[in-house]
Image (cartoon, rainbow, N blue to C red):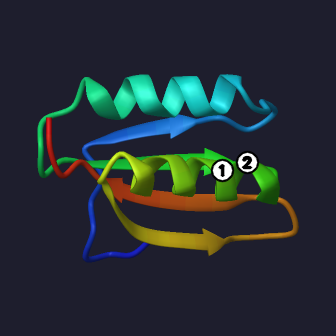
Amino acid sequence: MDEAIIPDKRLNLKGFRCPYTFVKSRLTIEAMTPGEVLEIIVDYEGVSGSILKSMEDHRHRVLKAQKTNETDWILLVRKEME
């Protein structure tokens, strides 16, 4: 994780696929306050791409998308608006 960015919430979605990952990440960030950062951990590249697109489509800011090992990705998203 980037030392300069400390997430306000963490969501581990390893082992899950869409649509669960999409719904869970969207509900989690919608419950957060603008400016807060959500860390999402997934273990499937296709899921990371769909979550990132969804977050951008809803005008949240993707701060980081990093593959951490053979399967895992860490996504950092800041809630931008209500």
Task: Give the side of residue 52 with respect to residue 19, left or right.
Answer: left
Mark 1 residue element: helix
Give me the residue at 71% from left, 26% from top.
Answer: 19
Q: Residue 34, image x and y in percent?
A: 12, 44
Query: Is 72 situated above or below 40?
Result: below
Quarter occupied by residue 45: bottom right
Marker count (numbered)? 2
- Give the label on residue 47, or none: 2
Quarter occupied by residue 4: bottom left
Task: Give the side of residue 28 with respect to residue 35, left or right.
Answer: right
Give me the residue at 77% from left, 30% from top.
Answer: 16
Amino acid type of the residue that numbered disc 1 sits on in the rendered structure: Ser
Q: Which residue in the rendered view is the most extreme toward the right?
A: 70
Task: Give the side of residue 35 with respect to residue 64, left or right.
Answer: left
Q: Residue 25, image x and y in percent?
A: 49, 33
Give me the residue at 56% from left, 24% from top.
Answer: 23
Q: Residue 68, image x and y in percent?
A: 69, 70
Q: Do labels 1 and 2 touch, CB within 8 Å?
A: yes
Other residues around mark 2 within 10 Å, as few (<14) / some (14–19) / many (≥20) = many
Mark 2 residue element: helix
Amino acid type of the residue that numbered disc 2 sits on in the rendered structure: Val
Q: Nearer the viewer, residue 1 or 37?
A: 37
Marks 1 and 2, how far apart in space? Answer: 5 Å
Q: Residue 27, image x and y in percent?
A: 41, 23
Name the image quarter holding the C terminus: top left
Other residues around mark 1 within 10 Å, as few (<14) / some (14–19) / many (≥20) = some
Give the labeled residue for mark 1: 50
- Give the label on residue 28, or none: none
Give me the residue at 79% from left, 70% from top.
Answer: 69
Front position among marks 1 and 2: 1
